[in-house]
Amino acid sequence: MRARAARFSRLRSPPRPGTSPHARGRECGQATVEVVALLPLLALCGLAIMQLLAAGAAREYAGHAAEAAALAVGAGHDPAAAARDAIPGWSAGRLTVHAHGRHVHVRLRPHSIVHAIGDILAAEADADAGPAT
């Protein structure tokens, strides 16, 4: 038992000269206040990372939607319907498809808390159905 107590006593830092045991408790309280003060910053960083991940997913989905729309143009089908079918249902309302001849342009806004950020991070993709046969 003494060996265990001696081992734990080595882990504690020695008291600084001129400080009381109560001062150590205040230092722990200060650390708690600092952690609580950083929580909003950590939450903001987490939201920013999630927003960037949503923008990356939107970019990937826009590419899939553009390819599906170009294939639909080549087959003589509706490119907008094909593009909406190629992406998850939750993102279909944020998709715009413009077909000009055999060329297709797709724009997809990612989910965002602030609407303006979704517009800034919108993903665009182009695809071409190739020459007419």
Image (tube, rainbow, N blue to C red):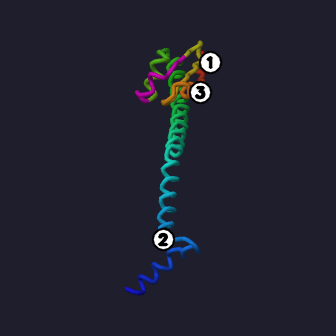
Question: Which kind of residue does numbered mark 1 sit on?
Answer: Pro
Tag of residue 131:
1
Q: Residue at x 51, y 31 (%)?
A: 61
Q: Is residue 5 left or right of residue 74?
A: left
In this rendering, the label closer to the viewer, 2 or 3: 2
Which element is circle 2 on?
helix
Q: Quadrant of the C terminus?
A: top right
Quick one: 34 or 127, which is closer to the camera? Answer: 34
Q: CA distance from mark 3 to mark 1?
A: 33 Å
The image shows residue 71 at horizontal and vertical percentages of: 52, 22
Q: Which mark is residue 9?
A: none
Few, some or many C-alpha atoms within 10 Å of disc 1 (few <14, some 14-19, many ≥20)?
few
Nearest-to-viewer mark from 3 and 1: 3
Nearer-N-terminus badge (1/2): 2
Could you tell me if the residues under marks 1 and 2 are in contact, i.e. CB atoms within 8 Å? no
Inspect the magenta stretch and tell me whether residue 93 lies in it: yes
Q: Position of residue 96 (x, y in %)?
A: 52, 19
Residue at mark 1 to residue at mark 2: CA–CA distance: 83 Å
> What number is the disc on residue 120?
3
**Residue 64 coordinates in the image, percent (x, y):** 52, 29
Of 5 and 21, nearer the camera is 21
* Amino acid type, residue under disc 3 in the picture: Ile
Magenta stretch bounds: 88-97
Q: Residues within 10 Å of mark 3 (few under 14, many from 20)?
A: few
Q: Which of 19 and 130 lies nearest the eye of the viewer?
A: 19
Q: Secondary structure at mark 3?
A: helix
